Amino acid sequence: MLSIQPMKCATLVLLALASSPTAAQDKYPTRPIEFIVPWGPGGGADQVARKSAQLMEKVLKVSLPVINVPGATAQTGLNKMITAQADGYSISVMTGDTYALLTDAGTKWKLDDIVPAAIMIRQPSAFFTAENGPLKTWADVEREAKTRQLKIGITGFGSPDDLTVQYFVKKGYKLVSVPFAKPAERYTAILGGHADILYEQLGDVKSFLEGKQMRPVIVFSQSRFPLYKDVPAGKELGHDIIINQFRAVVMKAGTSPQRVKVISDALAKVAAADDYKAYLREQYADEKSFIPAAGALAFMKRELETMRKYALKK
């Protein structure tokens, strides 16, 4: 009987280890992962999250409910994530608009508060006007902006939108930033005459372009966009400011590297899916947009350097 006792003890130890929190952490995910979108429904961030969540559920075998938490240039939703547990069960979309707020030393959150799991999309940005409005070309905008104030619909102060507007203000254009927290409000602002110009990504307003409700007047890129060859690129006109929109999936700093990798690997499978590749094409995005966790932080640091360069020129 005595010889059996050590075996019983060993069994009890193994059972204890298997039921311990550490062992439980190795099984991830085991329950739904909250996917926070810090913007209202219908915008680019919302689209990326819903498309990614739909495809990730097939990989991770858990649901990823998308929750919209707009406000304060997405800082409200971001704060919801970074105040949650660092356990991988709360992830969020980070847009270039929110990320640019780091150019302000007074911003309460820091890059060290998040860890990127992947960059999911990169798109060129542009100024748009209403198709039936008086501003048909960039030449029209230049002429009018020299004599009267033009309102630019943007996501929020301190965003790449705002940095771009301030770039032109510095050059003598009479432009003023008007923030709209909800994407739909921004889009309808120029259609309803509440703003003269919209700063947005081409893909995000594709339906309005195809419906002949909006038109791009300048694209902030190195060269002309293939589908709009008559629209000048900023670079060719001497406007070097190019802050392409990106949207990343981020997690709270302190989340275990293993769990970050699980999410990053799942997003890699999303990016490789034909459905997602088609989505990138529909959004006029860079077909090589995806950057895994291993390179995402370096990319974001480079983007911040660019943003800070233009913020200093304000």
Image (cartoon, helix red, strand yellow):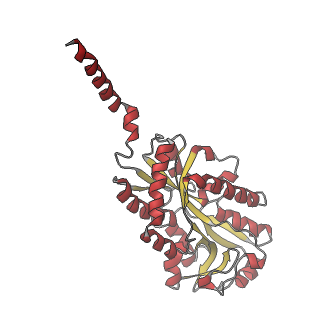
Q: How far across and how far down the image is residue 253, in percent?
A: 55, 43
Q: Is residue 6 above or below residue 171?
A: above
Pick out the residue farthest to the top: 2
Quadrant assignment, res 225? bottom right
Residue nearest the observer in this picture, 114 or 149: 114
> Is residue 176 in view?
yes
Pick out the residue farthest to the front: 3
Q: How far across and how far down the image is residue 260, in percent?
A: 49, 47
Q: Residue at x 42, y 70 (%)?
A: 275
**In this image, 212 relative to 151: left or right?**
left
Q: How far across and how far down the image is residue 85, in percent?
A: 46, 40
Q: Is residue 149 above or below residue 137?
A: above
Residue nearest the observer in this picture, 2 or 58: 2
Q: Residue at x 39, y 62 (%)?
A: 55
Q: Residue at x 46, y 67 (%)?
A: 42
Q: How far across and how far down the image is residue 82, in percent?
A: 52, 44
Pick out the residue farthest to the left: 1
